[in-house]
Amino acid sequence: MTTKVERCAIYIRVSTTEQMMHGKSLEAQKEYLTNYAREHNMAIVGIYADEGKTARKELKKRKAIHSLLQDVEAGKIDVVIFWRIDRWFRNLSDFYKVQDILDNHNVRWISTSEPGINMETRDGRLQLNVVLSIGQNEVDTTSERIKFVNEASIRNGKLIFGDANMGYGYKSGIVDGQKRMVKDHDREHVVNAFYEYFFKHQNKCATLRYIQETYDPDFSFGIMRTLLSSEFYKGTYRGFPYCPAYLTEDEWNKLQKIQKRNVKATPSGRIYLFAGMIRCPVCGQLLCGTGCSSIINRKTGAKRTYCYYRCNRAMIDHICSYRHRLSQNLVENYLLDNLENEYKNYKVKCEKIEKEKEKQKKKQSPEKLRKELDRLNFLFQKGRIDWDYYNEEYGRIESELNDLQSTLPEPVTNYGYLEELLDTDFRTMYDQLSQENRRAFWRSIIQEIHVNEDHAIISVDFL
């Protein structure tokens, strides 16, 4: 009897660890399924392959599945065939998400080597759920075991990945008879130059251009992003000492602070000296740079650039009342004239805060908390308080005592560099700086500039 030809999609998958296993390679699956389709009067409309993907990988990361589902929704497929159900899914929730789409378009699937597993019969559905549950548990168990082994290797500094995943400036090497991450001597000077330039100028685009023009034309934005974010460069991985460091912990923390305040270059070439430093006095949003240019000499065409800071939540979103544009020139002139006074005021404010902290520490000293525990013990032994009250209060005070003893002393900020700067003729030095270096100057000493609704600077916080 002649049967209608069905349009068939072949789905094949192999994870990285299965690449070399007999019978599980993509080519072996493809050949087997192609022959199956021909023998069962199916017309192959597409072959969808996920190479190096596990069946527990997030559904959004399995690109071949998405392509297959798009063709299902376009009405191009009648049946999907795969070698085994574990090639299709090992995740119950993702399986049924895809199954809903197949059902909506009347598309069925066939596990060619497991004819007993199907969605058409009760026994087939039971067997399907059992196999999927076992497969999911097996993958989870394997994943936990691999994670445990990897964590042990990381603690011992053993290398667990290839050179491509190490980051610019590192390579694999043998240290004390063990394969570890070591510095790449051919690129070490480039990495050091990158950090030196970035700390000095605090500008991503300028640093990228400098490295490309001076050291490595292939140095990309992606490499720069890795150097600014990967903990390898402070010598750790997942919090454990792991490799030679390019930066100290303090330098790394400083790098992260600079990144948060870093600003993009504007198409107009305008340089905003205080971007990321000023907040809206009404809504607290960071003020954004804006500006304009005007011709000051019609014969020569010379222009003057004006830079301002505004609240976009007021100007664009209309959900804030602060519609003033703060002049960069006024802020700059104010800081140059009042930098010393602002520093003195900030120092007094910090000293007051430190005194308040000391008072709080004295109120909650370990000695007082221990005496309170002794008092509770005495009252309970004398029968003056019941067990519930005693147990609750003892637990609370003991928790406070543990927190107090585990709290590390906060590092004292050293403003010696700023005091030395104020003792010099920094105005003369400042006048000779380019706009980019002026921005780097302010960003190296100022954390935040506070303004009020009358557009006046009320205080400055220093780094």
Image (spheres, helix red, strand yellow):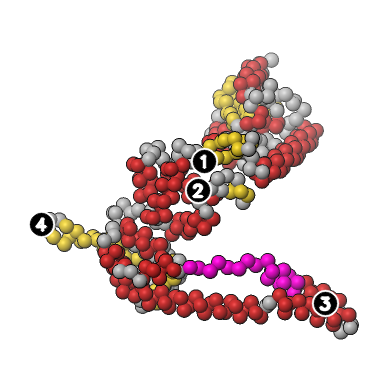
Numbered label attached to residue 299: 4
Along the line of sight, which residue is nearer the eye, 329 or 344? Answer: 344
* C-beta proximity under 8 Å, tags 1 and 2: yes
Q: Can the viewer see residue 296?
A: yes
| Residue 343 as seen in the image, left or right of residue 327 | right
Query: Residue placed at 78% from the left, 72% from the top?
Result: 395
Q: How crowded is mark 3: few (under 14 residues within 10 Å), some or many (20 or more)?
A: some
Q: Is mark 4 on a helix, strand or loop?
A: loop
**Is residue 196 covered in magenta?**
no
Query: Residue placed at 50% from the left, 68% from the top?
Result: 413
Placement of 89 over or under 305, stated as above or below: above
Say which amino acid is labelled 4: Lys
Query: Range of the magenta residues?
Result: 397-414
Placement of 204 over or under 350, stated as above or below: above
Distance from Cα at disc 3 to Cα at disc 2: 53 Å
Q: Can the viewer see residue 326?
A: no
Q: Is mark 2 on a helix, strand or loop?
A: loop
Distance from Cα at disc 1 to Cα at disc 2: 9 Å
Say which amino acid is labelled 1: Lys
Q: Is mark 1 on a helix, strand or loop?
A: strand
Q: Where is residue 128 in the image (x, y as percent from the top left)?
A: 75, 34
Q: How crowded is mark 4: few (under 14 residues within 10 Å), some or many (20 or more)?
A: few
Say which amino acid is labelled 3: Tyr
**Is residue 399 covered in magenta?**
yes
* Residue corresponding to mark 3: 390
* Residue corresponding to mark 2: 246
Q: Residues within 10 Å of mark 2 (few under 14, many from 20)?
A: some
Which of the marked residues, 4 or 3, is nearer the chain's N terminus? Answer: 4
Distance from Cα at disc 3 to Cα at disc 1: 58 Å
Q: Where is residue 449 in the image (x, y as percent from the top left)?
A: 40, 70
Count of numbered labels shown in the rendering? 4
